[in-house]
Image (tube, grey):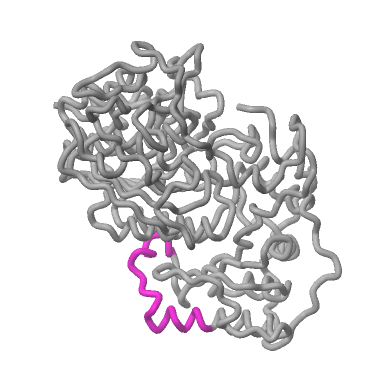
Amino acid sequence: MKNSNFFAACILVAVVVSCNRQEAPLNPGRVQENPKEVMPKSAINALVNEQLRQNSRFNWKMVDDKALWSALVQGDSVLAVGYQAAGVSNLEATIDKIDIHSESWTTARQNVLNLILDNEKATGASVKSLITYEASKLPVFYVKASHLSTVKALRASGLVRYAEPSSYAKYMNDGQLAKGRSGPFTESNLLTFGCDANLPKPSLVEGSDYVNITPGAKQSWNYVLQGIPQAWTQSTGSNVKVMLIDTGVSPDQANLGSAFNQGVSSGRTIEKIATYPGGTPADVCGHGTKMAGVIAAPRGVNGSSAGIAYNCNLLTVHAAENVVILSSESTQGISDAYVLGGDNAAVKIISMSMGTIFEAGQITDAVNYASNKGKLLFCAAGTSNSFFGPLLGVVYPAYLPSVLAVTGVTESITTACEDCHTGSQVAFTVIMEKNGTRRNPLTTTATGNDPNTVGGSSVATASAAGIAALVWSKYPSYPKDSIVARMKRAASNYPNRNSKLGWGYVNVAQAVGN
């Protein structure tokens, strides 16, 4: 992992402020004055840092009311509120079955909104001006809020599951210098992490980094190490639809457009949509195009790199602005994508190579929704950078129980790639870094046929999704648990799960079987 760490710059070590949610409910209509002092970002970040150090995760329920309110007003004052009908329990298991438009749910929603209005009325607020976003199927809405009394009342209510400052991550930098950096660490550094022009890699060497395969494609160096070419004799991913939640796909890449069917890739579909507010299906970052290429690029005739499941169907979603989930807009886009994937009967696998250090109740709701609908979910365990850093193991949402976390390893198999996170939640690994040269797997560029390469747990996750598509294509009647079981039994660590690298890498030929 890299030694640079965003928290070394903006988080000061501090004692943990205990979370006390037992305050007495506020009197309706009584607005308490806000404190004269707001906690500085450095103090808020210190609390985040301490929870990460102690628990390897952070949820806003871990801090007290003043800290949460301070984070709210230090950001954009948008509060994500997850509500529930009276008497509801174990919503994780039933969230795909509820009807938020039924009487019990609309009553709960209105009661929560009334509570907010009571505490925000000093601003002359109305429901219309307060609500900035409302999910269509999940019980969550976003409101503009600025009063500590609102935070206190929401957290004390039995109708409220979570109340979170939705965009604090976007604003958390306090302008200090990052350790080992030559200048200030700005918001733009995070907003462009994982993004680049996605140009061809001119240094690729035939026979070492790839081999040419019929009818005129390139096979990445790592495929043979996991038995993918042998698996292709049994399955190429036909009739399996994979949803890719990422930054979109380049409209200039014909291999992921008009030439998606070429060579021995035929009879399949690619769909491109956007759930990011105001976005289009086009890739604004480059990352989504790379992931799409790894999963499903055609085994064609023009010298481009072949995807692992080169005959699968692909649904790409532009859901976020980049790899690090920072803003309320990205949270909305990702959550809406998972719900759409859950409701799409043809989608079997959902792959997302994005993450964050801040748990978001809405994303958790959406992940559970899609999982309950029978979708097989893969998420990236994390790739080190100045935001995530060596402080962390598996990042959110990859560590959720309903998700399979994936990370990358070197040719040595038992060694994680230099920048890849590991941890007890890792389910599978993918061989994606050469010893010595550290060459990563091939993928599709923004335009043209000459390949680029891509690394980190991102490519490992997309690869795992492609591998699952090969297995599911061979066994179309199997439920997702049976597909995972086949992958486990064909994995390098089976039957003994490794504490950091899970079941290990999958021998795909064995997983597909005869």
Q: Examine the structure image and report whether residue 171 is included in the region drawn in magenta.
A: no
Residue 496 seen in the current view: no
**Residue 92 belongs to the span the image colors magenta:** yes
The residue at the point 86 percent across, 70 percent down is 36
Residue placed most toward the observer, 372 or 317: 317
- Residue 250 position (above or below residue 208): below
- Which quadrant of the figure has residue 489? top left
Q: Quadrant of the C terminus?
A: top left
Image mark count: 0
Q: Residue at x 52, y 30 (%)?
A: 420
Q: Position of residue 432 (x, y in %)?
A: 43, 24
Q: Which residues are magenta?
A: 90-110
Question: Residue at the spot x=56%, y=28% of the render?
Answer: 419
At x 63%, y 73%, the residue is 144
Q: Nearer the viewer, residue 430 or 433?
A: 433
Residue farthest left in this picture: 514
The answer, for residue 220, to whether it is visible in the render is yes
Percent across and percent down for residue 410 are 46, 19
378 horizontally vs 149: left or right: left
Q: Is residue 508 above or below residue 16?
A: above
Q: Is residue 368 left or right of residue 375?
A: right
Which residue is the extreme one toward the right? Answer: 36
Residue 506, position as x, y percentages in the image: 32, 27
Q: Is residue 268 left or right of residue 25?
A: left
Q: Position of residue 431 (x, y in %)?
A: 40, 23
Quarter of the picture containing the N terminus is top right
